[in-house]
Each structure stands twice: as C-alpha cells, then as structure tokens.
Amino acid sequence: MKHVFIINSQIKKRKRMKFYNSIRSIYKEEDILIKETSYSGHAKEISSTDEKIRIYACGGDGTIHQIVNGIKDFSKVELAIIPLGTGNDFIKSFKSLTKKDFINLNNYQHPHTITCNLLEANEYYAINTASIGLDVKIAQNVDKFKFFSFLGSAIPYYLGLLYSMMHSLTSVYKIRVGEHILEDDFTFLVCGNGKYYGGGYCPVPKAEVNDDKMDICFYVKTQ
C-alpha cells in the first residue's frame, strides 16, 4: 500500500522536521509520498484520488476536514490521523486512545480500521461536527483579532467571544428533526458525529462516529 503524508505547512518547522525524521525512520522500505499544503484548500485537492492508498492527515481538525472532502467519493482510500494541530478534537471521541497513540507511527504498521459516518451540509461534509449560531460567529470574529495572538494563542478567541457578546446572541432558525419542526431564537445548534469541538467542549457526549446516527445539541433563548 502507498502511504501519503499530507502535512499542514502552518505547523511549526521544528515539529515538522521531527515528524519527517519519524516517517523516514519507520517507512524505510515502503512506498511513501510526503506533501506539504501550500494554500487553503490544497489538502482537499491533493487527496482526491481513487488509488488504493492510505492518507495521513498531519495537522489539526481543519486538515482532516479538507482531506475528508477530498476522499469522500473514493472507497479505496484509508484515512489515518496524525494530530499535530492545536485542538485536535476529533480524536477525543476515541476514548481508549491518546494523542500519543495517534502520533506514534509504529501503531500504523498493523492498524485497526473502522468505517466512519459523515455529516452532509450543502455540498460539504464533516467527519466531526457541524454547527450554527454563536460558536460560528465567534470563530468568524477571531479573524478580526489575530494580530493579538502574540499575547497568547487563545487571546484572539477570547476577544472574538467578547466581540460576539456585544451583539445579539441569538438568531431565528427553523430546524426539522425527523417529523418535528422547531422554529425559535437559538443561541447555537451543534450536530455531532464526533463528541467534541471548539478545543475540548463536549456538546454531544453520546455521539459515536460509526453508529449511523447524528446527535444534536441546541440552546434556545428563554423568556
């Protein structure tokens, strides 16, 4: 099997170099290809293939999201996750495994594979969660304060939260769940295939990635 490592170029150089050395040490005799992303959406483009390969998503949840949308139509492709990002929320749904287990390339010599469900939102697919409401507004507002990241990586998120709280915390949504239709002022709504999002928040603790079900958490404004 061919092994393709797609590495997010935003990862710090020292961490990338250390990981390169691990790849070359373990996959000495195997067919490997290492690619770094060059721009937003690049991981999706270079992962779109119908070959029988294993793609290693080396980065955070954003890298996984791009690759999932690149391989969703190709049944021969396996996805392995190397959590080199910041939040790495998707792997937290696998309670018996740690971040070190995922990063240790020796564990992929004889891996255990599972089939995983996806959430569809318009033309995009999510392997972990999809949400609307306040949490999305905060993520959008983070870009306004990225300059302040020199004070700490979490500072733009706190400022994005404060900025969002200066405006309306709710929006009117009409939601259909099976035969039930809900229309109300929602603060947020999270649809989960995985359990965690947002750097460790667990809105859907009973979600399982391969149970063919979508778990939903929502917060409605009360009078």
Image (cartoon, grey):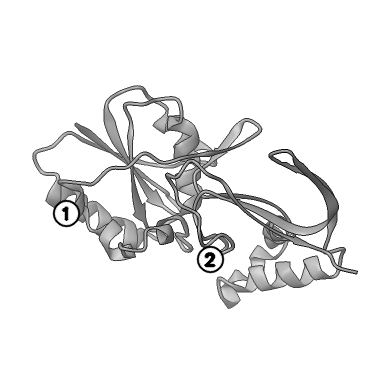
Residue 170, x across and y down, in percent: 83, 60
Outermost residue on the top side: it is 50
- Above or below for 169 versus 129: below
Is 105 placed left or right of 181 in the picture? left
x and y percentages locating residue 190 in the rendered image: 64, 54
Q: Secondary structure at mark 1?
A: helix
The quadrant of the image that shows the N terminus is top left
Res 156 visible:
yes
Q: Are marks 1 and 2 in contact (CB under 8 Å)?
A: no
Mark seen at residue 199: 2
Mark 1 / mark 2, whichever is N-terminal: 1
Which labelled disc corresponds to residue 196? none
Label 1 sits on residue: 106
Residue at left offset 50%, top offset 34%:
69
Which quadrant is the C terminus positioned in?
Answer: bottom right
Relative side of 68 to 18, left or right? right
Q: From mark 1 to mark 2, how far is it between C-alphas?
A: 27 Å
Q: Quadrant of residue 120?
A: top right
Q: Position of residue 59 (x, y in %)?
A: 41, 53
Looking at the picture, tell me which residue is in the foreground, 104 or 201. 201
Three-letter amino acid code of the residue under disc 1:
Asn
Q: Which residue is drawn at the image coordinates 46% and 30% (left, top)?
A: 72
